[in-house]
Image (spheres, helix red, strand yellow):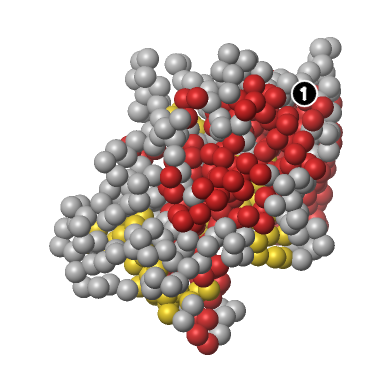
Amino acid sequence: MSSSSFFSLLSQPWIRCDMPDGSSQELSLRELFDGEHPALRVRGDSPTQDYAVLRLVLAITWRAHRTDEVLADVHDPYRFDDWWEETFAQARSGARDEVVLEYLEQHAERFDLLHPQTPFLQVPDLDTAKSTRLPVRRIVPEAEQDYFTTRAGHELDSLTLAEAARWSVHLQAYDYSGIKSGALGDPRVKGGKGYPIGQGWTGLTGGVVVHGRSLRETLVLNTPARLVMSTDTAADLPAWERQPDDATERPSTAPTGPCDLLTWQSRRLRLFVEDGRVTSVLVSNGDKIPEAGANILADPMTPYRYSANKSKKGSPVFYPRPHDAEQTVWRSLEPLLVREGVIVDLPGGGRAKGAQPPKAPATITALTELRNEGLLTEEPLTVELVSVHYGPQAASVSHVVSTLLELPRSVLTSRSPQLTEVLLSAGRGAREASVRYGRYVGNLLTAAGGDYVYQAEAAAGVLDTLEPAFRSWLVTVDTRDPDGSLATWFRLVEHQVLDMAATRLSGAGPKALAGRVVDQGGSSRIISAGTAFQRLQHDLHALLPQPVLNKEKAHD
């Protein structure tokens, strides 16, 4: 990096966003807050990159506004509500945010991607004994290898500075574990290698974003003021406000708060630039998350799970909870809705003795505590779920979980255990119905003369078919009569599954229709396509009962 080179993230466009006219545009950090560029949302090269960049912008917003006058009176119990309402109104109007713009100017030098002493999220003199240089694709995750397939010529081997900035933010958030290049000056290096310290902090979490009508609204909706704006966060600094990193690990690896976590430097990075493009990189170990994230509870955008194995009497242990890789939509509601004060029994007998309820994302909990609920309309809120799943030893990226759910505000912010149980029962019932269908198709094979094999692909097809209807049902749930809504959903599930089963039955063939005698547990019985269908009907009727309507309605 020459002393004449610079690429200021404040003035240079690098954050790719959706705009109101349907176009995609790269904006600088200043442009996000100048009131003249009404971005709808961050939309870059991948869902995980978008999430990582959004979190960086959130950290900027939180740090800038912590000095707001409305928060100064620590004895005012309503200061956080006042701040949220004022800031949300400003965001909805699209007005210029002078507070953030002034903050950016104060730290402008630290936002230069090519600064000779303090390049953004990098160590300027990072090197190895062998002067290691890695291809630029090293900072593009394995799950995104096809990102390069649409590029040609020199673009295949290099990144623009805007691209490199986005992927650098992503690397710090999500980089996989495994052996890294051993950096000179890092006492942890052995034999020229940096041995595994785990993935980036964000890679341990289940990301949750509540989207507003614009990016500015989204920033406020994902700001739980009591957590991120309190006086307890005075020592909580993002990466650009701390002493610049060198090749060594931080003296104390305990995160100091939400801004520290959202900009956690899990790697030491150096970008090598030729003719205005990044042509190679060096990635080494950075700061290790202690104890695999145990009881690091300051990230407001992830749910947390209780660990019975690690907890001791009087010392509960929680870990960040990534989203389920399989059946994501069907399993997504529990980590959003089940929390302290809104507890439902788990299937099969409830929670283990002494177990504590999971923790929902603080962003969701904060919306349930709004003083003025009228600030949010009844139109559905879009909730985005983002997670990365890693391979063995977290040494590679396996796949990315990314999905959107639309939920009414009254559902997302409900404090009703009854409503929560209904929502979870709806997803659970659909999953169980799909399992019964997988068994039914397996029984058809048996009836035709084959061996019984559970048909997982057929079961998955049920959920694929039901998913659009489930999304629509979530938007229309009647919060004052949740049992009635559940009854409607169960009828739809039963009808859909039996309709699919009838189609299978009509094509079962004469052998399956005639059936055969099979031995089960020492007794003989006939299995035919007809008996398999009858069994499915019986199972679904027992699995999807019509709820007994309560006289008392569930309230928000």
Residue at 32 percent across and 39 percent down: it is 253
* Quadrant of the drawing holding the C terminus: top right
**Quarter location, residue 480:** top right
Q: How many marks?
A: 1
From this view, report whether residue 98 is shown above or below residue 130.
above
* Quadrant of the drawing holding the N terminus: bottom left
Q: Amino acid at mark 1?
A: Asn
Q: Which residue is mark 1?
A: 372
Residue at 25 percent across and 73 percent down: it is 131
Q: Is residue 505 visible?
A: no
Residue at 38 percent across and 58 percent down: it is 118
Given residues 73 and 397, the one toward you in this image is 73
Q: Position of residue 417 (x, y in %)?
A: 68, 20
Q: Is residue 205 left or right of residue 497?
A: left
Given residues 276 and 220, the one toward you in this image is 276
Direction bottom: furthest residue: 153
Given residues 38 and 372, the one toward you in this image is 38
